[in-house]
């Protein structure tokens, strides 16, 4: 079975773009992208026997229906050049700039993922990877258009491949399209997936629809005439359309055990009006004539869905006793309902509306994406807050609607209202009753937050209670500010102590010449920033002294370290770590727990930076589940990896020389050490390069044998 749609050409694509963007510079860039892709793909054929260029052309054409901006159209035309031609990323950036190149790189990354839909965990894993690897939401939208055209030509693949692609589309991509509000693309993807996954069911439903089509069309026509007559009598300008129910949505209802004749919204209308006020007027008029079905009314205008969908839904007893589902919305609401957030990229006065315009227009879902993407949250939190969670609607005592993910707590509510309310919160009253802070809010709850202006702030335990990324981020921000004050005091103490140790007076240190030299060398804006960085261990206090005293004043410890570091060790992780199901992805070693070969490890998906490898015992990942991915060490690893040990001793006579000697004998490299000694305790934090966990264990035993050493422990920072 082939796709019967009219062949897309560049001229047809240009005509569609011209309907919403007449800017010559933009059109020239789109033509340049097409010609570049045409040349790169020249001679290539798809399995359909079409020229390869027809695929990116179709993807770009699909995106014109959502008024995609010039960068998105260009990236759609170019989305396969990195993967299927000799084009380099550098060439792409040189020809089309960073924005377009980054979109193409993003799509290429996603296309390299190997899908494995064995269970729900793997499905969720792939969803989060797709979102996590997409720095720009437009990458996901291009991927959806790419998949839609591939699904339209899926007939060219083997039956096994057809089912694999259809299952992947249903499991991974249609939920994303749904949450982005891209209803047209979502519905077609679902119908096409069902056609290949369950062809018997699909064509059975098509047959039932065809059998009843004439009767349904006639019933809908009569109801449309009645609605039109009624609204005209009341002077409401409007437009009425019959609405076809998707094959997949019928299948889902039949799959629950319902009969075809029991699907009430098979007869459905949409009423379009100019204003929000007219939506409610039309609803009242229709309800005065046609009796509504109890509990079938939904007001998505007052309380929009997370993907910005707005409409009034009602089911009424219409003509001939039939049930009709009627949706009432403005023309603008319909645009969002069909095309989602991308519909707000439409052109205005020759310029693409920016993300900031969308925020100013209070586009709820798009605003959430931008707000979250601009904060330091992890991919799991981003997905949980924006993409995959159900939504509840709660209320302030004044009746303001606060939208939250299902499972949210009063703390989430407080931070959604205002940061200061969250920081000063001491309790909550829900529906007139006092509730604990971990109480799960329900749809329709009225929430009052009790605050105390003298409160010291949130508890760190709240991070384990709250649901939303915004609340977690604001709680972390509070403690970052608090930690900054603590680090300022600690850093000042460390610098003062080190100055005394090296017999440098505070006046010498604070002289304009010395202070400016230190701040410039260590890249700090002022002395407060220097103290904070020292207190947070981002700057070694000995580096401050080194800048003050100059290179010629190197002490005995630095000479020892230089001797120990005579040979640099390559610590690239390439090919050392296997990430299950994914090839050619950037892999980084976590600086907090510093895993080495032999450690039990897990991968952690980091926004924009690939996979970070942690030890399983690392507290930073120990309590996480959904954001973790399976990784393992390769069998043959020849290079050394860094880790940190803490050595405690009763004295420090020749201690470092002895440790360096032991390291040299064990083929271990000492990278860096820091003297943490305090009062009568002698403590050294030492960074070393070591082959594996077994070698580390032997080295620790060697160091323990040095006279005066009390303990040797591996640490996590």
Image (spheres, helix red, strand yellow):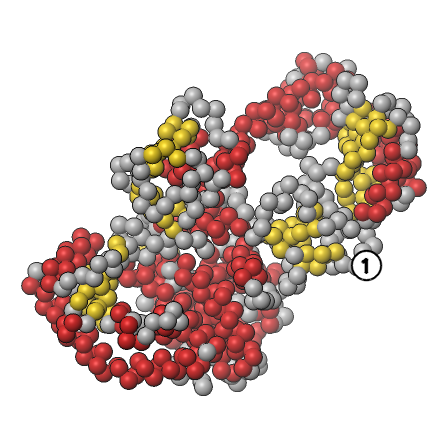
**Residue 477 falls left or right of residue 666:** left
Residue name at image x 88 percent, y 26 percent: 708
Q: Is residue 457 left or right of residue 330?
A: right
At x 82% / y 45%, what residue is drawn? 690
526 or 367, which is in the foreground?
367
**Quarter of the image where the N terminus is located:** bottom left
Residue tagged by mark 1? 636
The answer to whether 703 is drawn above or below residue 228 in the figure is above
Does the rendering let one see residue 292?
yes
Is any atom of residue 59 visible in this view? no
Which residue extends farthest left?
A: 233
* Percent x, y of residue 393: 33, 47
Q: Position of residue 186 (x, y in %)?
A: 40, 67
Total marks placed:
1
Q: Position of residue 287 (x, y in %)?
A: 14, 60
Q: Secondary structure at mark 1?
A: loop
Q: Residue lying at the far front in this picture: please name it.
A: 257
Q: Is residue 548 above or below residue 91?
A: above
> Is 330 on the left or on the right of 429, as rendered?
left
Query: Does residue 174 lie above or below 430 as drawn?
Result: below
Q: Residue at x 58, y 67 (%)?
A: 118
Mark 1 nearby-residue class (10 Å; few <14, some 14–19, many ≥20): few
Query: Residue at coordinates 57% horizontally, 28% vertically from top-left?
Result: 484
**Quarter placement of the C terminus:** top right
**Is 36 in front, or is 414?**
414
Asked where in the image residue 716 lies, by quadrant, the reply is top right
């Amino acid at each position: 079975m082939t796709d019967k749609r009219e062949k897309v050409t560049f001229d047809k694509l240009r005509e569609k773009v011209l309907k919403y963007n007449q800017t010559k510079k933009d059109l020239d860039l789109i033509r340049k992208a097409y010609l570049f892709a045409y040349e790169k793909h020249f001679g290539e054929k798809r399995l359909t026997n079409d020229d390869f260029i027809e695929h990116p052309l179709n993807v770009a054409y699909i995106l014109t229906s959502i008024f995609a901006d010039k960068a998105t159209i260009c990236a759609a035309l170019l989305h396969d050049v990195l993967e299927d031609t000799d084009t380099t990323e550098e060439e792409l950036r040189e020809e089309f700039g960073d924005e377009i190149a980054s979109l193409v790189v993003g799509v290429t990354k996603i296309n390299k993922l190997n899908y494995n839909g064995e269970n729900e965990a793997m499905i969720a894993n792939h969803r989060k990877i797709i979102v996590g690897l997409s720095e720009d939401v437009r990458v996901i939208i291009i991927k959806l258009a790419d998949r839609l055209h591939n699904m339209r030509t899926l007939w060219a693949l083997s039956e096994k491949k057809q089912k694999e692609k259809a299952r992947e589309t249903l499991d991974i991509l249609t939920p994303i399209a749904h949450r982005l509000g891209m209803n047209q693309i979502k519905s077609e993807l679902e119908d096409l997936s069902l056609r290949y996954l369950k062809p018997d069911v699909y064509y059975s439903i098509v047959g039932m629809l065809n059998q009843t089509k004439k009767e349904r069309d006639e019933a809908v026509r009569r109801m449309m005439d009645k609605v039109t007559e009624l609204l005209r009598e009341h002077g409401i300008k409007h437009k009425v359309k019959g609405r076809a129910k998707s094959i997949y949505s019928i299948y889902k209802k039949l799959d629950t055990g319902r009969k075809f004749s029991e699907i009430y919204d098979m007869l459905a209308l949409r009423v379009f009006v100019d204003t929000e006020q007219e939506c409610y007027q039309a609803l009242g008029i229709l309800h005065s004539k046609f009796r509504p079905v109890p509990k079938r009314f939904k007001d998505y205008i007052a309380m929009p869905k997370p993907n910005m969908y707005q409409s009034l839904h009602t089911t009424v007893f219409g003509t001939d006793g039939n049930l009709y589902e009627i949706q009432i919305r403005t023309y603008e609401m319909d645009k969002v309902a069909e095309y989602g957030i991308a519909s707000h990229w439409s052109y205005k006065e020759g310029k693409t509306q920016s993300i900031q315009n969308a925020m100013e227009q209070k586009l709820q879902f798009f605003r959430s994406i931008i707000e979250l993407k601009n904060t330091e949250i992890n991919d799991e939190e981003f997905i949980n807050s924006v993409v995959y969670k159900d939504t509840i609607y709660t209320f302030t005592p004044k009746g303001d609607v606060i939208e939250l993910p299902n499972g949210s707590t009063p703390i989430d509510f407080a931070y959604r209202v205002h940061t200061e309310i969250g920081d000063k919160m001491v309790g909550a009253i829900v529906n007139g009753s006092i509730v604990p802070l971990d109480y799960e809010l329900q749809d329709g709850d009225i929430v009052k937050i009790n605050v105390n202006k003298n409160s010291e702030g949130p508890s760190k335990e709240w991070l384990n209670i709250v649901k939303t990324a915004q609340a977690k981020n604001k709680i972390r921000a509070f403690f970052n500010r608090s930690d900054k004050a603590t680090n300022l005091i600690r850093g000042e103490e460390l610098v003062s102590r080190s100055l005394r140790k090296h017999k440098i007076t505070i006046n010498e240190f604070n002289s304009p010449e010395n202070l400016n030299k230190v701040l410039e060398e260590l890249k700090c804006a002022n002395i407060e920033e220097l103290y904070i960085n020292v207190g947070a261990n981002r700057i070694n206090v000995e580096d401050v002294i080194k800048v003050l005293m100059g290179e010629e004043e190197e002490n005995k410890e630095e000479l020892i370290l230089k001797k120990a570091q005579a040979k640099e060790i390559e610590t690239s992780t390439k090919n050392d770590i296997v990430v299950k199901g994914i090839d050619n992805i950037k892999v980084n070693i976590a600086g907090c727990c510093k895993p080495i070969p032999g450690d039990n490890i897990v991968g952690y998906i980091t926004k924009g930076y690939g996979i970070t490898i942690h030890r399983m015992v690392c507290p930073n990942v120990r309590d996480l589940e959904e954001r973790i991915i399976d990784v393992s060490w390769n069998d043959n690893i020849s290079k050394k990896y860094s880790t940190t040990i803490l050595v405690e001793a009763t004295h420090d006579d020749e201690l470092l020389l002895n440790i360096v000697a032991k390291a040299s004998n064990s083929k271990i490299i000492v990278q860096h050490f820091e003297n943490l000694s305090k009062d009568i305790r002698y403590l050294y934090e030492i960074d070393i390069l070591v082959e594996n966990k077994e070698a580390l264990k032997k080295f620790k035993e060697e160091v323990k044998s040095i006279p005066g050493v009390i303990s040797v422990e591996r640490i996590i920072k």
